[in-house]
């Protein structure tokens, strides 16, 4: 039997991020004479989750459960989350089934941010439907929260065959092609449970096959797995360059003429959720001759580069000499600023956007100087018509809580310079980082010991002399984020994808449309917006939502001792905003009258004359809220 290798890219990864390093490793191995095959199980997973026939089948399967629970007098505490998920899933059913196919197309082709956000909502609803049988598992487009921590080998083993593992049956169905060796490629921690699951299933089907793990995750946050690999795999390899991958293969087979080849190889780029061929660059590639030689080829009109690691102004200018024939952007390091001349030069070299990492000013900074430098950078970008995006990081050790609050106020006062806020992140202290190795240099006065049960622990709680306590980061963040969030810009998207870090087009917003004067002439026809469900429910969604908790990996869920009692309620459910509004029976009656287009004058005739003024006022408020809309504007508004 000839030696062949299957390289698997497992879920759950961002479906907009093209694994360029992986495809380059495959291309290099193939050019070096190795029989190697790429199995993109991540994209296969998204295709499976979002396949319309599969979605319809899931609804059909869950109908019995919804019918059963909707007739019960009470919902026990440990079933509240599941029933709340069922309730929302069936309210969304027609919306999801009608719009899902177009939503997936939109994510792959459109650069209009508003359209992408509408599509992302439909896709999230389909994903939440998929996860229901695996409750309390909570999935997102770029993350997976199961009951089990990815920082504990014991818990990772437990997750494999647990009923809440949403990957088990999918991965079992995907292991078809035989090979003499399997390599599982890992780029992020949310791939660890699928990786353990896949490894187990491959061993189960092919007991004598060699299995290795490889990828950039093991060069950074997963480095401890290199020295402490699980017993059931051959080895763990850190890969940041195709040569790392080739060298790992040469240890078990002879490679006479290794060839480094960059590119997509046989990746199906059209499957990824971006209108561009986006390549995320690592800083060390700037000095690589093989990479620079690849860049000299003809650039594709759809290719864009993003230098995603924190970058200094000097390094960005160096990259400009290499990338000037391409469209690109970069992640500007938090302590860096750009002059007008810098911006003009970068624009001439192809820069189309700048994503700025912001951590506040440091305790030793001259605050006025930092403010002026920031304003200078913003002004220069605005004058050059280069969009500026922000990722805000709370908890940098050399800043302080008081200074960070003042910094957020400063940002809030200067929102006109910002095109979009992308992330609001919490600083994490990782083992073997500069902060870990030299804590005193960064003002860190205490680092917690490793938890005995967390042998793969990556992040560690800490305190600083400036007053930071990482245990309080989340509470502080939730109190500050609203100061800088602007819904009209689609700030801080719920599921941040790689494509959100790049230049996208922001069209006119609905909020701007809705400020128009409401015409209440009797001949105006109004109708219930198609994005609104007017329903009577057997349980209060507010009561159910109170019983739902965030799934925190590694933490047992504690449930309230009180069940939710059946209580019939009238509600509006906004499909676009995923929001319930409790209404009384009078409002519900008015809205049912508007299920089909009706003139305001005809609507009023259905009520006693003494109620006309109050009904007219109610209709006006419902129109202002987008619940009732003019018939002629329906296709525009929805």
Image (cartoon, rainbow, N blue to C red):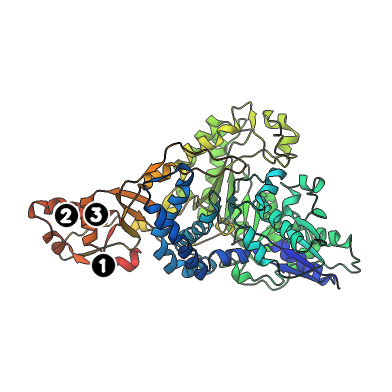
Query: Callout 2 environment at 10 Å: few (<14), some (14 to 19), or many (20+)?
Result: some
Give me the C-alpha separation between circle 1 and circle 3.
19 Å
Q: Is residue 328 above or below residue 371?
A: below
Sequence order check: which comes first, mark 1 or mark 3?
Answer: 3
Which label lies toward us, 1 or 3? 3
Q: Residue at x 44, y 42 (%)?
A: 547
**Residue 273 seen in the figure:** no
Tally the numbered discs.
Answer: 3
Q: Is residue 415 above or below residue 282?
A: above
Any mark on residue 631, and which? 1
Any mark on residue 616, and which? 2
Quarter assignment of residue 603: bottom left
Quarter assignment of residue 461: top right
Q: Nearer the viewer, residue 126 or 466?
A: 126
Q: In what element is the residue under mark 2?
A: helix
Q: Nearer the viewer, residue 294 or 55?
A: 55
Query: Callout 3 environment at 10 Å: few (<14), some (14 to 19), or many (20+)?
Result: some
> Mark 1 near mark 3, Cβ–Cβ under 8 Å?
no
Q: Position of residue 149 (x, y in %)?
A: 65, 44
Any mark on residue 588, and which? 3
- Quadrant assignment for the C terminus: bottom left
């Amino acid at each position: 039997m000839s030696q062949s290798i299957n390289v698997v890219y497992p879920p759950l990864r961002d479906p907009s991020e093209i694994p360029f390093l992986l495809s380059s490793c495959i291309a290099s191995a193939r050019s070096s004479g190795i029989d190697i095959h790429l199995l993109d199980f991540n994209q296969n997973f998204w295709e499976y989750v979002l396949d319309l026939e599969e979605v319809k089948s899931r609804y059909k399967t869950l109908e019995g459960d919804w019918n059963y629970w909707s007739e019960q007098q009470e919902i026990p505490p440990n079933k509240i989350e599941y029933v709340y998920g069922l309730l929302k899933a069936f309210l969304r059913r027609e919306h999801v089934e009608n719009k899902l196919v177009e939503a997936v197309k939109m994510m792959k082709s459109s650069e209009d941010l508003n359209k992408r956000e509408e599509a992302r909502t439909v896709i999230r609803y389909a994903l939440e439907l998929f996860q229901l049988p695996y409750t309390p598992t909570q999935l997102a487009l770029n993350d997976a929260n199961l009951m089990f921590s990815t920082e504990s080998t014991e818990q990772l083993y437990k997750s494999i065959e647990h009923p809440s593992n949403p990957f088990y049956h999918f991965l079992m169905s995907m292991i078809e092609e035989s090979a003499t060796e399997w390599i599982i490629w890992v780029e992020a921690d949310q791939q660890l449970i699928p990786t353990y699951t896949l490894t187990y299933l491959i061993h189960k089907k092919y007991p004598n096959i060699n299995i290795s793990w490889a990828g950039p995750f093991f060069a950074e946050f997963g480095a401890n797995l290199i020295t402490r690999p699980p017993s059931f795999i051959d080895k763990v390899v850190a890969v940041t360059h195709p040569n790392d991958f080739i060298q790992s293969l040469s240890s078990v087979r002879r490679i006479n003429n290794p060839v480094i080849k960059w590119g997509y190889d046989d990746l199906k780029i059209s499957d990824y959720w971006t209108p561009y061929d986006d390549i995320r660059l690592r800083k060390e590639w700037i000095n690589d001759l093989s990479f620079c030689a690849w860049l000299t080829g003809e650039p594709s009109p759809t290719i864009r580069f993003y230098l995603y690691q924190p970058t200094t102004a000097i390094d960005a200018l160096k990259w400009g000499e290499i990338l000037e024939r391409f469209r690109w952007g970069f992640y500007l390091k938090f302590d860096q600023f750009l002059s007008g001349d810098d911006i003009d030069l970068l624009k001439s070299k192809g820069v189309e956007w700048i994503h700025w990492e912001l951590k506040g000013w440091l305790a030793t900074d001259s605050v006025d100087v930092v403010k002026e430098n920031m304003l200078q950078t913003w002004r220069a970008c605005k004058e050059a018509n280069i969009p500026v995006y922000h990722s805000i990081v709370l908890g940098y050790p050399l800043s302080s809580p008081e200074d960070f609050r003042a910094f957020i106020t400063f940002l809030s006062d200067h929102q006109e310079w910002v095109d979009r806020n992308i992330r609001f992140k919490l600083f994490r202290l990782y083992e073997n980082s500069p902060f870990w190795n030299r804590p005193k240099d960064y003002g860190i006065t205490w680092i917690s010991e490793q938890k005995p049960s967390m042998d793969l622990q990556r992040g560690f709680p800490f305190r600083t002399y400036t007053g930071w306590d990482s245990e309080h980061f989340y509470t502080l963040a939730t109190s500050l984020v609203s100061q800088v969030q602007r819904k009209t810009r689609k700030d801080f998207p719920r599921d941040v994808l790689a494509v959100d870090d790049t230049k996208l087009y922001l069209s006119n917003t609905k909020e701007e449309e809705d400020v128009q004067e409401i015409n209440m002439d009797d001949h105006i026809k109004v109708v219930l917006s198609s994005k609104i469900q007017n329903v009577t429910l057997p349980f209060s969604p507010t009561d159910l939502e109170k019983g739902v908790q965030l799934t925190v990996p590694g933490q047992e869920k504690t449930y309230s001792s009180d069940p939710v009692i059946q209580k019939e309620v009238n509600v509006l459910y906004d499909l676009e905003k995923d929001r319930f509004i409790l209404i009384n029976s009078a409002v519900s009656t008015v809205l049912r009258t508007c299920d089909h287009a009706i003139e305001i004058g005809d609507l009023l005739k259905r009520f006693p004359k003494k109620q006309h003024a109050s009904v007219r006022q109610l209709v006006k408020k419902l129109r202002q809220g987008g619940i009732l809309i003019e018939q002629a504007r329906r296709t525009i508004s929805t």
